[in-house]
Image: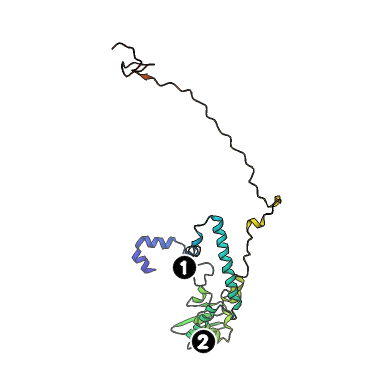
Amino acid sequence: MKNLRDEGGAPMKTFLENFPKENWSCAYFKGNRYGDMYSTVSELFQSWTLELSVLPICQMVDGIRIKLMGMMSERSCEAEQCSSILCPEMEKTLNEMLIVGRHWNAIRSCGSVFEVLAEGSFTVDLDNRFCSCHEWQMKGFPCAHALVAVRKNSGYVYNYIDDYFTVSHYRSSYASNILPLPDIKDAVHEGSEDTVVLPPLTRQPKKNKRKSVEKVPRPIKCGRCGAVGGHNKKTCTAII
């Protein structure tokens, strides 16, 4: 932040002071980001549906529905095959964190508060899910310092991990199915007035007729004698 202010000068300083911090900083975000920040979600969605963008609006929306239906089904099947408590990627992260802190020491201060001696000294509060490195608070996933304190406390590590990372939560996210839609010609039955959508009743707007304006004939100037009247040089009889 200091480098940004020094290099950007007054405009950058004003920008950082006026721009809401919760829109660009995990530390100030009022909610759970789980350690992720993305500014290109719309671009990712556009690239995913790029081949549909040239279609008319109804076909494009139906194409997006079909893609979502397939994605929901695939991820639901993947979730059913998982046998671990956490999603496979997070199980791998958990094991890596446990290996990182295997040589660290945790000393109880009081109750659920520990001091973890690693490359530095860190304070861990298990009840409040707090670590002075702030990684646990931002991600909802315990850092290596917190895991050392949990094991020192003879606790169950999965009790200190947010439900967001569990397989059960992943399954519930894709539990709702998108049902197929029948073709419109198969859904409409002839002779049934309930299935026929008629246009709304409308009244044609009244046309305001403009009153005709009497045209005043344009005066004709004779090219032979120069007089203004009802004749031209072809019919001019004046003596020159």
At x 62% / y 71%, what residue is drawn? 172
Q: Is residue 225 left or right of residue 57?
A: left
Q: Residue 84: x, y in percent?
A: 58, 81
Res 116 seen here: yes
At x 37% / y 19%, what residue is drawn? 220
In the depicted view, which residue is nearer to us: 66 or 36?
Answer: 66
**Residue furthest out toward the left:** 240
Q: Residue 160: x, y in percent?
A: 57, 79
- Callout 2: SS: strand
Circle number at residue 5: none
- Callout 1: SS: loop
Q: Quadrant of the N terminus?
A: bottom left
Q: Quadrant of the C terminus?
A: top left
Q: Is residue 196 above or below residue 92?
A: above
In the depicted view, which residue is nearer to us: 32 or 128?
Answer: 32
Q: Amino acid at mark 2?
A: Ile
Q: Residue 225: x, y in percent?
A: 31, 15
Circle number at residue 107: 2
Res 169 seen here: no
Q: Residue 104: x, y in percent?
A: 48, 87
Q: Is residue 214 above or below residue 87?
A: above
Crowd around label 2: few <14 · some 14–19 · many ≥20 (10 Å): some
In the depicted view, which residue is nearer to us: 128 or 139?
Answer: 139
Numbered disc in front, either 1 or 2: 1
Discs 1, 2 touching: Cβ within 8 Å: no
At x 51% / y 87%, what residue is drawn? 107
